[in-house]
Image (cartoon, grey):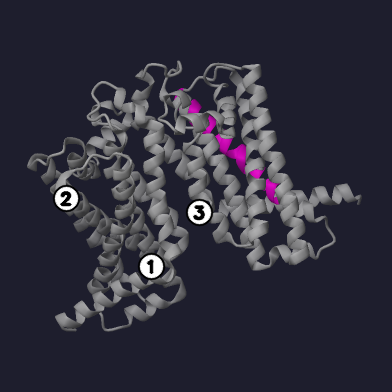
Amino acid sequence: MSGLALNARVVGALGMRSVRQTLRRPQLVSPILIFPTLLLAVQTGGAGSAVDLPDFPEVNGFLDFMIAGAMIQATLLAGNSGGIALAVDLEMGFTDRLFSAPISRFAIVLGRLAGTAVLGAFTALWFIAIALIFGVQFEEGIPGAVLMIVFVTLSAVAFGALSAAIALYAGQASVVQGLFPLLFVILFLSSAFFPAELMLEPAASVAEYNPLSFIVTGIRDQVVGGFDLAVFAETVGAIALIGAISIALSAVALRRRLRVG
Amino acid sequence: MGAAAELGTIWALVRRSANEILRVPGAAIPGVLAPTIFFLGLTAAFGSLTLLPGFTTDTYQSFIIPVSLLQGAGFTGAATGVNLARDIEQGWFDRLIVSPASRPVLLAGLVLSASLRSLIPATVLLSVGFALGVEWPGFDGLALALALVLGLGTAAACWGTMIALRFRTQSAAPLMQAGMFVAILTTTAYAPLELLTGWLQDVARLNPVTQVVEAARQGFVEGTLSWSETWPGLLALAGLVLVLGALALRGMRRASY
């Protein structure tokens, strides 16, 4: 078997293990699906009157606006859960056993990211299903929904790589778990839950330049507003930027772990 | 066991909980950070809702602070359930139930600890809130809000205990947290009842925690307290503590080693 095929098998096997591991543990599933769904339901009903505010974007209902925020919240948390699971593997010695196997070390991290990507795609499908059930109309139809899934999946890999870097560097699940509050700070300081121009200062200014806002806008445009090439380019750029930095950090952290042990 | 011994046991359990905070201060951080971040985040994101006709205040932070206080109490209570599940998994709880202490005494110790611990996030939240322009609710308004925080911390601890005794694993933690999350946020948490939309308006009308939120909110939003807005909150909370306390006690009595 060629090296590439072997590594592809390793990535596939570890990716499947990662997905199964998440689906079997309520502590890992609930931040990805249950909490974002509950928050989506509560915020849609609680702040739904916001659509009557002057300058609120033209929408059929608040759920149209919120669905992208819920997706990106779930994606961030899926990435973090992947990092926690990797740190647990490091703590339990499972990763050490993989390191001593005749396989590429990067394939081990890529396997975890493949699992995170699958979970990202699953969350996108989950929220698209919720949107359809509750009458959200996709401005861009099926191609728009497919683009949403692609954006969410790629974002999951980018965020997952960042969590993986921290897990590899710290080697402790509690450190990665400690990022949870920080993720919510990043979320609230973006346009995930409300239009940036209607947020209070200084959050409004931060949200305008937060890369997460660019990603959310790209996802949201498939439901509200329609496809826009400039927004598409900004979204791809934001995902690529976060992904490049995260993967570079993961590579550095992996090398350090292999050197230091 | 005499009354003095029972009180001594309750006090020992409260001391044990306090020791956890003193020896592992980091363990208290998530319970403080989560409601504080939600308070700051919701204010920043949804602050413009006060511009809607019919909104009862022009400072969203005053409107949302009671929700965050109760959320802090809810998280603290749920954490008690998680800690109990850990004690069950590690066998410490088995040693407790073979001791001469009665089950109601053990439950009282757990619940009282949680109730007192809920004052930690409340203190941090109020400090942050007042620094960010939350209206002063008056001493009576503040006392009522804190009393309701203690009460909801008790109810949440009973809920957490009940779930921990039923599932006997820390894997049930999301259920403990989700229960409190749903109870507190399916109320008038984000906006007055008239401005809620869809199903949430109906649920909030029926949810007893809405009365608790409204009672805690009145001082911050109106600046004065009225008995007509206070008694439904106290009654709803008493009912929650009674029902959840009875269920938790039933779980305690059924617990075997």
Local crowd size for mark 3, using a 10 Å CA cut-off: few (<14), some (14–19), many (≥20) = some
Span colored in magenta = A111-135
In this rendering, position of residue A32 left or right of residue B95:
right
- In what element is the residue under mark 3? helix
The numbered mark at residue A114 is: none
Give the left or right position of residue A249, taking residue B69 as reference: right
Drawn side of residue B118 relative to residue B174, left or right: left
Can residue A129 be seen here? The reply is no
Q: Are marks 3 and 1 on the same chain?
A: no
- The residue identified by callout 3 is A26
Front position among marks 3 and 2: 2
Residue that label 2 marks: B144
Residue A103 x %, y %: 83, 57
Residue B67 in picture, x, y percent from top left: 29, 43
Q: Farthest residue in the front direction? A: B131
Residue type pointed to by label 3: Pro
Q: Which residue is mark 1?
A: B21
Answer whether labels 3 and 2 touch (C-beta < 8 Å): no
Residue in the picture at 31% in, 33% down = B200
Please state which amino acid type lies under the numbered disc 1. Answer: Ile
Magenta span includes A4: no
Host chain of mark 2: B
